Amino acid sequence: MLLTFYIFCLVTAKFTVAKQDKKPKIASNYAPKRIQCPSQDTTLLREADSISNNEREWLQRRQENILPNLYDFLTRSTANFEDNSFIDELFQKGNDKNDIYDYLPKIGIAISGGGYRSMLTGAGILSAMDNRTTNSTINGLGGLLQSTSYIAGVSGGNWLVGSLAWNNWTSVQSIIDNWNVDDKDDDDNNGDNGSSSNIEEHGESYDDVTTNDGDNDNDLVDADYEVNPIWDLHDSIISPGGMNIFKSAKRWEHISNAIQAKQEAGFETSLTDVWGRALSYNFFPNLNRGGIDYTWSSLRTSKTFQDAHMPFPISLSDGRYPGSSVINLNATLFEFNPFEVGSWDSSLNAFFDVRYLGTNVSNGIPINKYREHTESENGLDMVGSSDDEDSDSYECIVGYDNTAFIMATSSTLFNQFLLRINSTKLPVPKFITRLATHFLNDISQDYNDIAVYHPNPFKDSEYVLDNFTNSITQSDSLYLVDGGEDDENIPFVPLIQKDRDLDIIFALDSSADMKLQWPDGSSLVHTYERQFFKQGDGMAFPYVPDTNTFVNLGLNKRPTFFGCDASNMTDLEYIPPLIVYMPNSEYSFQSNQSAFKLSYSETQRRQMIQNGFEIATRNNLTDDPDFASCIGCAVMRRKQEALNITLPIECESCFVTYCWDGELDTTELPDSQKDWHHSFVYENGKPNFTNSSQSVDANGKGTFDSLQNGKSPYMRDSNSKDIKDVSDTDHYKNTKIFTGTLINIKFIMLLLCVVTFLIGLI
C-alpha cells in the first residue's frame, strides 16, 4: 500500500512537471474572460447600509413560495394541540398580501464548518426539514426547508450549501438515490448498526444547471471521463483514482492545466485554486471537469433561483493578512451571495458585484480601458489590433467567480492543519512533523495557504467607517481564508444583520471543539462576544452560557433554544433572532469524524446522513414525540411576541423543555475532554485563560446575569472596545505574494502526498 502511495506521488509529480511547458488546451475555460463593462458609468461597489435591491426583490418572490409551505408546516406540526387557531390569526394579520408577508416568521439556517463531517451531518439535518425526503412529514420536520428564507454555510457547511444550490437545488434524497451500493463500502464503517434509514427512494432531475458567461463546454462531459454521483467520496480528492494511479494522474493533469490557464491569462493563483478544482469533481460531477467554468453568479440565471424555489445561499470567509496566523474577533468577515461579495463589518462596510470579481477598479469604478480581445488556439485572450486606446469603454472581468473557487475560499484548511501538526497530542513521528512543517511553512511564506483575489475589488473604497484604518482598501489584493478560523465556526453574522430581519436561525453545529471532536458551543459564545467589539457594533446576538456550562449541562448533545424571551434582551442593539441549536451528537453512528478524513464509503455516508436526520428529529421523534410541535412554537415565537398573540399551553411547555433558562455550571472540564485549543475570555484585549466572570458558587454553579453597562459577562474590560482590529497592520499593504510564472505543481503534489500520509497515520 505504501509502495503504491509513493509511486503515485512520484509519477504524479513527474507527470505534472512534464506538462508545465505545454499550453493548456482542454482546461482553458478556468481562466477569467475580459469583456466590455455594461456601461460607461458602471459602478460595481455600494455601501453596506442595507441589503441590495436585487436581494430585496428576490425575497418578495421567495415569500410568495414560503406562504403556503409555512402554513402547511405549522398547521401539521401543531395538529396535536387542543387549539391551533392562533396560526390562522397569525396568517390573517393585515389587509393585503404585503402586510401578511410582514407578519410571516422569517427563517434562516446556518451550517458550521467541519469538512465532510459537517457536510454529511448537515445533509441529514436538512433532509429531515425537506418535504422531498420520504416520510419527513411524518417523523421529521418536512416543509421547514421550503419555509426558509436564507441558508448560510462555512467551510464544510458551505460545501453542503453550494453543492445543493448550484446543482439546481437538488435534494439530499435525490443525491442518495443516485449512489450505487458497492461491496467494498463495508470496510472500516466505524459502527454499522443496521438501523433502518428514513432516506429512501425519491428521484429528482438536474435539468437547470447553468454555467458562466461566454463559450463553455460544461454541458458535455469528456468521453473518457467517468461520471460519478454527487458526493462520491469513496476515494480521496488527493488520489481520486484510488489504486489507479494513472486515473489520479489524469485528474491532476486537468487541474494543473486549469491553474496554468488562469496564470497565463494574467491572474494570481494560490493553493486555494488547486483545492477548489480538486473539490469540484465531488460537487459537480455532472459538469465537464467538475464545472471548470461554472460561476457563482450564474445562479442568477437559474430558473429555480429566479423563481425563488430555494433559500438565499450565503458563503462566509474571513479576511486574513499574509504572514499572520492569528484570526481574532475583530477579523473582517466576508460573505458571498449570488449577487454580491463584501462585508457588513465597519472595517469594510461595502459590497461588490460578485459577477465582476477580477475587474481592476478604484472605489468600484473600472479603470482599465477596454480593448478588443480574440481567443487564441489555446483558449487564451489575445489583444486585438484595433486602435481603441481612446475608447470610452472600460474593461470588466467575468468568470473569476468560479463556484468551486469560492467554495474552497470558505474552506482553506491547510493553515489549521499547520497549527495542529505541531501538537504533541497527535500520534505523528517527529521527523514527519518536521518535514510537514517545513513544507507548510514554505507555502505560508509564499502566502499560498490564502485565497488571493487580485485585483482587490475594494481598492480605494470610500465606505470604511472613520474609526477603522483603511488597510484593506489600500491593498492591491484581497486575502481570504476559511470562515471558521476566527472560532466563529457557525455563519451567524450574515443572518443576524438587522436589515435581514430574521426571526429564527437553526444552527447546525458539527464543530470539533473538544478532544473527541464534538462541539461545545464555542461558536455561539464567540459570536455572542463579537457584539462587544468594534467589528460587532450594530449587531445583536442572544445570551448564551460559557462552554463549560454547555458541556456540563449537556447542551452540546441535544437541541436547545436560546433567546426565547425578547423582553429579556432589551439591553442589546435590537431583538436578535431566536437560535435553535442543533449540535452534532451520536444517535446511530459515531459522527465525530475528523475534518481531515477525506474519504467515506457509501455505507459511512448513509450512516452519517441518517445520524443527522436523527439529530434534527430527536431520534425520529421517539425521544420526544412533541419535538416537531416545539419547533413550530419556536418558529412563531418572535412574531407572537411582537403581535401579542397568545400561544397555547403546549408551546409554553415546549419552552420550559427546550429554552435555556440561565442555569450555569462553569465547573472546569477535565483535560481529557479539552481540545488542542483553549476556551478563553479577553482581558485588556488579550487572551486570558480564566473562568467566566459570571457569579457562581464554589461549585461553579449559578444563574446567568444579563448585560450590565454594555459589558459582556465573559470578557474583562470589553466595554472599552479599544482592541486593535487586525486590519490595522502593515502586513496588508504592499504584501508580497507568490507570483511565479507558473504555480509549482510539483511542490503542491509533494505537499498533498505528505499531508495524505500524515492523515493516514492519524
Image (cartoon, rainbow, N blue to C red):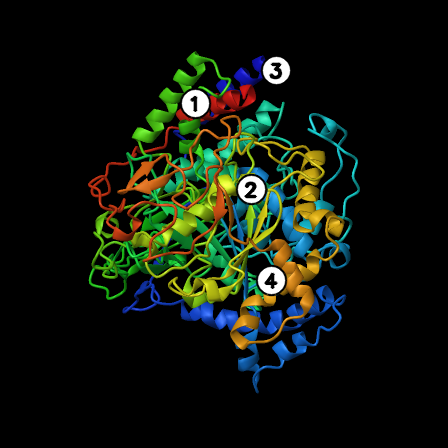
Residue 582 x %, y %: 59, 49
Secondary structure state at the residue bearing disc 1: loop
The disc labelled 4 sits on which kind of residue?
A: Ala
The disc labelled 2 sits on which kind of residue?
A: Ser
Q: Does the rendering let one see residue 400?
A: no
The mark nearer the N terminus, 4 or 3, is 3
Secondary structure state at the residue bearing disc 2: loop
Q: Nearer the viewer, residue 80 or 567?
A: 567
Q: Label for residue 634?
A: 4
The mark nearer the N terminus, 4 or 2, is 2
The residue at which mark 1 appears reads as 423
The disc labelled 3 sits on which kind of residue?
A: Met
> CA separation, marks 3 and 2?
32 Å
Q: Nearer the viewer, residue 528 or 453?
A: 528
> Does 406 sit left or right of 595 as displayed?
left
> Does 417 sit left or right of 161 as displayed?
left
Q: Does the rendering let one see residue 583?
A: yes
